[in-house]
Amino acid sequence: MTVQQMEFKAEVKQLLELMIHSLYSHKEIFLRELISNASDAIDKARYEALTRKEIGEAAGEWQIRLTADKDAGTLTISDNGIGMTKDELIEALGTIAHSGTKEFLRAVQERNKEANPELIGQFGVGFYSAYMVADRVTVVTRKAGTDAGAGVKWESTADGTFAVEETDKTGQGTDVVLHLKGEEKKYLDEWELRTIVTKYSDYIDHPIVMEVERKKPDAFDKDKTVSVREDEVLNSRKAIWLRDKAEISDGDYSEFYKHISHDFNAPSKVIHYRAEGTSEFTALLFIPEKVPYGIFFKEFKVGPTLYVRRVQIMEHCEELIPPYLRFIKGVVDSSDLPLNVSREILQSNRQIETIRKSLTKKVLDTLAELKKDEPEKYRSFFSEFGRILKEGIHYDFAKKEQIADLLLFPSTKTEEGKLTTFGGYVDAMKPDQEEIYYATGTSLDEVRKSPYLEAFREKDLEVLIMLDEIDDIIMGSLREYKGKKLKSITRGDIKLDKEESSAASAKEGKETFARLLAVMKDILKDEVKDVRLSGRLRDSACCLVTDEGGIDPNMEKLMKAMGQDVPANLRIFEINAGHPVVGAMNAIVGDETKKELLSQYTEMLYSQALILEGSKPRDPAAFAKNLSRLMTESLSKG
Ligand code: ADP
Ligand code: MG
């Protein structure tokens, strides 16, 4: 049989370098990682065995076995799970970099690992962590359902290459043989291994078995003892979600969470409950602390792991949670689903529907509690996941008010670093205020200085500030909160003056400026839908607003970035009748000698409005040139 020598992928090489030369603490986590892989492999085989009996029969009892060989200096972790084919083996252990690798490398490089010994323990660094304690690792594996001749052997001293050859193997599954480094021989010691297993892998569903030596009284002579070797199960095996909450420590929850999520951080919130009645199930859910890399991509796998009576059916069951809660991790163990549920059945299953409703309610209730009881923690949750959560307003009609209650925003009245809510806003509304005002934009600073706010500031009206690109759509779906309409201040007409006198002066204004408006409209006819006098401006000369029902500029940018066609969407150009430049322009309307000048000024005003809304003037060069010319003229006049 031929031995194939192959190169590790560059990232894997880097990872191995680190494992060998830089990581000195928490080395014992290698065992957690290898046991976790063995457990995953058994879960997969057990699931296969539901439809292919021979796989279960070949396995006998599912188990993970630790074998410490003191003479050879090896520790072997064996499982009778799914195993790997040659191609799978080459991929999994050498040629593809797995999910956490990049983040791990970055974190280790960024921080001083000597000063942060805990860091290492936080990472699910996977199979390669074996090289923290071994200088050579041999993997012998055989895919479930194949015969004894189909085994494959992998071996590497982590020198940049690995060797693969075909071999015989009795029994399906995988043996990982660690040739321990001289100074790491303590991992052959029974008590050491037992302690590590209890600490990190106690909840593993499958028995972790080790042959141990025990002294027993001699059957013939009571005064003597004899040594016997017997198998002992090291873990308590109780699926953590089925255990009594009172018995479970935060540390237990964290370990389990890290095992299922491959996250490096502890979860920020644990939700653990049992539902009885129409549908019986246990749920153990986690809210992560940080947005996992990739969550915004389509390929990102979401949903808790689905178990039926402790048998794992599916790792990511997306039918169990609505998309706007896709950051939730965890386990759902149902007592009443059939074991052979398939994806197709799941999509139209009433039980699943009931479970999803229950989980949704529970998560939203938990978030509401968190917001009330631990505002700081909730804030950091919201800054990570708020953008995803608010999608629910658009997609889940029944829950939109409840989700709206969970949103946080800065406003024109919040202090530096503080946020408000719809509830807080409504409580502070002026007695005669009927609408909830909001402004969208890309940065807090930009919105705070924006001309759209001038009239609101003058009238001391609070305006919520929304900075996510999707906010405009979300608010469009929400429409109102507690009977108060939501009103975008960059959209439609704004009439803050209710008094008779100002209505009269508005009418008068319209007449005075009628010709100017008409001329401007003609000049800008391809650019804007209308030119009108503004009800929202005080100090600034002009601004652009979106028509009621139109697409706002942020949304337009987002749609373009996503490669979508954006419908023609002309905006409305508003000018401030009270501004001197507008007054001066009005004075030259009709003066044939100033016609060209008026046209130029109109263009310049329009360019300013574009800049103010965060867009570019349509002819930046001409704008800059005109501005410079005006500056020169004004300076030379003294
Ligand atoms: P992860 O478990 O996060 O995928 P690992 O580095 O721990 O990353 O393992 C890499 C891959 O190697 C696994 O995804 C799996 O495909 C394969 N693998 C590792 N150990 C086993 C095993 N005992 N049985 C079957 N496959 C395994
Ligand atoms: Mg793993």
Image (cartoon, grey):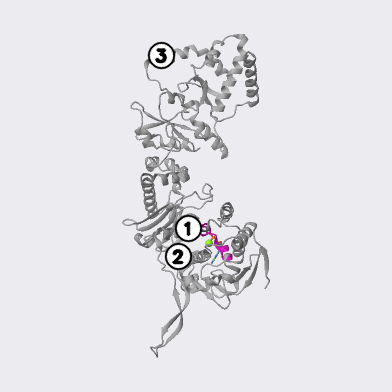
Amino acid of disc 2: Lys
- Secondary structure of residue under mark 3: helix
Residue numbers of the magenta segment: 118-131
List x then y, in percent, for residue 263. Answer: 50, 55
Residue bearing the label numbered 1: 258
Is any atom of residue 280 visible in this view? yes
Mark 2: few, some, or many residues within 10 Å (few <14, many ≥20)?
some
Given the image, on which type of amino acid does mark 3 rest?
Answer: Ala
Residue nearer the viewer, 346 or 390: 390
Instruction: Identify the image quadrant of the N terminus.
Output: bottom right
C-alpha span from label 1 to label 3: 68 Å
Residue highlighted by disc 2:
199
Please tell me whether residue 269 is drawn above or below residue 63 in the rendered image.
above
Identified at 62% across, 9% down, the residue is 593
The correct choice, above or below, for 96 with respect to 361 in the image is below
Front-most of residues 539 and 367: 539
The residue type indicated by label 1 comes to: Lys
Q: CA distance from mark 3 to mark 2?
A: 79 Å
Residue under the point 33% across and 27% down: 431
Mark 1 sits near ligand 2, with its Cβ under 8 Å away: no
- Residue 119 within the segment the image draws in magenta: yes
Secondary structure mainly formed by the magenta segment: helix
Neighbourhood count class around disc 3 (C-alpha, 10 Å): few under 14, some 14–19, many 20 upward:
few
Question: Tag on residue 504?
Answer: 3
Q: Position of residue 523 (x, y in %)?
A: 58, 18
Look at the numbered discs 3 and 2 and tell me whether their residues touch, using CB distance below 8 Å. Answer: no
SS of the residue under disc 2: helix
